[in-house]
């Protein structure tokens, strides 16, 4: 998004220069430079990330319930010479979900790990299936794995996870995804009367630098994607484009 905005500003500056509107052209160039420095040097990324990640812990609070569900959201897959594998940002989520599962089992409680994710990138394998292969190697048995393989978006993660959770009827539900993804995910899950406890799988930070860094620009784009998704939810609700919110009892309240 930052790159597109900069490209638009530069094209606008070029048009203004050709139209001999020098002062306006200079103003647009200054704005483009300011955006590039704010994004690439870190302050813009830090500000955007703070509004998304703050307040979310990487561990559970309190004691485990008798029946628990850990919902792991997909972060994509990548093609490799040996076949599709989890994308870079998926590993923190997977490791966190596996650790939570083992903590739950160590407490002597019943626990299911629900991996949610289809194949939006058309790599020939659902994210949930790819992640499940790694989860098994991390000690999660098939008997405790639930796979939701139809969803192609965070919205569908929530929509298609609901029936699986209703069937299991957990007394406690945890939602594991990237820190910057939690705010939007919780919003979508609440639309389907799901009220999980958030647990971040990773936490990212901008790198302060005197020179613009691609990493910081990428973080700005990732954060803006989340804010746009949040804004889109409210716009779609106002326009009646979202399916109506689930009005029935929610999880996990109904199971308590």
Image (cartoon, rainbow, N blue to C red):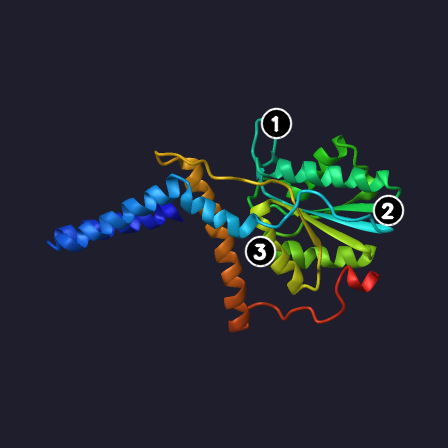
Image quadrant where residue 136 sits: top right
> Can residue 126 be seen in the rendering of this structure?
no
Given this view, does label 3 or label 1 mark the residue nearer the observer?
3
Measured Cα–Cα span from mark 1 to mark 2:
35 Å
> Residue 82: which numbered mark, if any?
1
Mark with earlier residue (3, 1): 1
For label 2, the crowd category at 10 Å Cα-Cα, with few meaning under 14, some 14 to 19 and many 20 or more, is: some
| Residue displayed at 61% across by 27% down | 82
Measured Cα–Cα span from mark 2 to mark 3:
28 Å
Mark with earlier residue (1, 2): 1
Image coordinates of residue 12 in percent, x first then y, are: 23, 53
Image coordinates of residue 101 in percent, x first then y, are: 78, 41
> Residue 110: which numbered mark, if any?
2
| Residue displayed at 87% across by 51% down | 66
Mark 3 near mark 1, Cβ–Cβ under 8 Å? no
- Which residue does the numbered mark 3 point to in the structure image? 184
Image quadrant where residue 43 sits: top left
């Amino acid at each position: 998004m930052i790159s597109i905005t900069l490209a638009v500003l530069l094209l606008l500056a070029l048009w203004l220069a050709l139209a001999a509107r020098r002062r306006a052209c200079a103003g647009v160039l200054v704005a483009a430079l300011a955006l590039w420095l704010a994004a690439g040097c870190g302050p813009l990324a830090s500000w955007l990330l703070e509004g998304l990640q703050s307040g979310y812990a990487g561990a559970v609070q309190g004691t485990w319930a008798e029946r628990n569900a850990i919902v792991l959201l997909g972060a994509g897959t990548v093609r490799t010479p040996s076949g599709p594998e989890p994308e870079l940002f998926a590993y923190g989520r997977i490791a966190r979900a596996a650790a939570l599962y083992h903590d739950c089992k160590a407490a002597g409680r019943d626990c299911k790990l629900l991996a949610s994710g289809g194949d939006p990138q058309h790599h020939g394998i659902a994210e949930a299936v790819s992640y499940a292969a790694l989860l098994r190697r991390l000690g999660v048995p098939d008997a405790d794995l639930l796979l939701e393989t139809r969803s192609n978006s965070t919205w569908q993660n929530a929509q298609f996870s609901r029936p699986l959770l209703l069937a299991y009827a957990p007394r406690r539900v945890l939602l594991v995804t990237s820190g910057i993804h939690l705010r939007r995910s919780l919003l979508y899950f609440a639309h389907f009367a799901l009220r999980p406890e958030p647990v971040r799988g990773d936490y990212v930070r901008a790198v302060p630098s005197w020179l613009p860094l691609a990493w910081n620009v990428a973080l700005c784009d990732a954060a803006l994607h989340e804010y746009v998704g949040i804004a889109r939810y409210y716009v779609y609700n106002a326009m009646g484009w979202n399916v109506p919110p689930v009005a029935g009892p929610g999880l996990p309240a109904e199971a308590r």
